[in-house]
Image (cartoon, grey):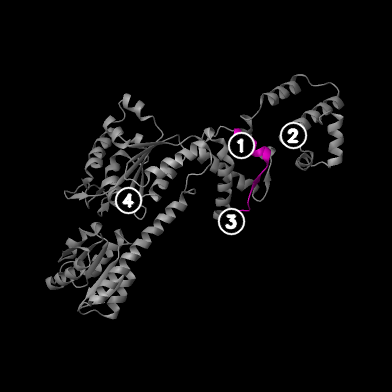
Amino acid sequence: MPRILIIDDEEDIRFSLKGILEDEGYEVIEVPSGEEGLELIFKVDLVFLDIWLPGIDGIEVLKKIHEVLPDLPVVMISGHGTIETAVQAIKIGAYDFIEKPLSLEKVLLVVEKGLELARLRQENRELKSCLSHKVSEVSGNSYAIKKLKKLIRQVAPTDAWVLITGENGTGKEIVARSIHRQSKRASKPLVAVNCAAIPEELIESELFGHEKGAFTGAVEAKKGKFELADGGTLFLDEIGDMSLKTQAKILRILQEQRFERVGGNKTIQVDVRVIAATNKDLEEEIKKGNFRQDLYFRLKVFPLEVPPLRERKEDIPILIDEFIQFLSQEHNFKPLKFSKECLSILKNYPWPGNVRELKNFIERMFILYQGKTIFPEDLPGDYLTDNKTDHQEQTEIKLLTELPKNFKQAKSEFEKCFLAQRLKEVNGNITELAKLIGLERTYLYKKLKYYNLLK
């Protein structure tokens, strides 16, 4: 339910405005001063703010609100406002300006529109966040991915907590975002926290927020990730890298869904679904004393494992097509194409960096060959090394150790070996082979016949 804050020194105005809003089903908090109001702005969805206040006046309060919460709708109210004051407030960041005596219809309309604006801004941030992660859904048609998608569909509509495991670069965050989008919380934010990237001394502030003056540099109060994710989903990435001290505190918070900000004493209640991810074997980390067993079992309500790319090679062409389409649109690149031989090589490459490595590889190819078709000879050497067949290796050894003394004979043996290998790659299709190696079909046919390569 939306929560509205009224900051006005006139008790009658607070009383009447609160009555109007509560009759419409809104939760209302009302205070008589800007100082008290600033303590509560992180807990509300919209603010009614009087311009003339004792102590800090409304314009100064508006400035402070806009500095820390620029998307919070603030409606300025005044009994003796001027056009200049209204314009100044709007320029600073006020959503609207209404004059006393307050009109019932005007109040309800401005609340409805203000909350809608805040919702649209939130959706816009979520959309940008999805786009920034390049691929927004789990892609592939392999058995492993079909099974993963089915499990996501089953768990997403529930509120069950999920523990996602998998190697680096497999797409664990994409799985988390897919779960959130298919959940009942999709209209609320998904807030991601990389536990490995935050220094231990700052992680409590990052997760639970802090009050002004809580530590050096805390010049303003700040919401933590738990509070920002209220009603939505909190994604704890690389949970295995969290310190034991923080694990102990987060376990209590996860169980109770209540906490205090760093430097604060007010208890904040949240409703958050937790999705955690790690590339570590947490059971092994428990044995080593690096991870709490009770936290592990609290998180592991519904485990999901994301398979490495080498175990779903049939998905590689699908992912390549998606990356080509995305990068073409994002950077206005001319589309790439990969020859069949190239795709065959890429499917056999082990991809130790998984989907992330594949995406980076495609971007690299765009920089080098945008608008062109890529053949095996265009691939970087490290992608060819691990794809040599036994036959290829034996041929190379033979060419190096048993080179004919006669140049004509050496040329002939190389030509035969080259044609045999390329013919195999195109499954015996002479027309396709002619296009591939740049020879006229009739001439190629004679060469193949001469070397007894025709079946």
Q: Is residue 376 above or below residue 394?
A: below
**Cα–Cα span, label 2 and label 3:** 34 Å
CA separation in Å, label 1 and label 4: 39 Å
Q: Amino acid at mark 4?
A: Gly
Q: Answer with mark 1 or mark 3, whichever residue precedes in sequence.
A: 3
The span from disc 1 to disc 3 (Cα, nearest Å) is 25 Å
Looking at the picture, which amino acid does disc 1 mark? Leu
Circle 2/circle 4 CB separation < 8 Å? no
The residue tagged 4 is 232
* Label ID, residue 346: 1
Q: Secondary structure at mark 3?
A: loop
The reply to whether the C-beta atoms of the residues labelled 1 and 3 are less than 8 Å apart is no
- Picture disc at residue 237: none
- Residue 344 drawn in magenta: yes
Q: Look at mark 3 in the image and give the residue it sits on.
A: 332
In this view, the mark in front (1 or 3)? 1
> What's under tag 3, amino acid-wise?
Asn
Of 206 and 294, the residue lying toward us: 294
Specify start and end residues of the magenta stretch as a single range. Answer: 333-348
Q: Residue at x 23, y 57 (%)?
A: 43
Residue at which label 2 appears: 422
Where on the picture, by quarter, is residue 349? top right
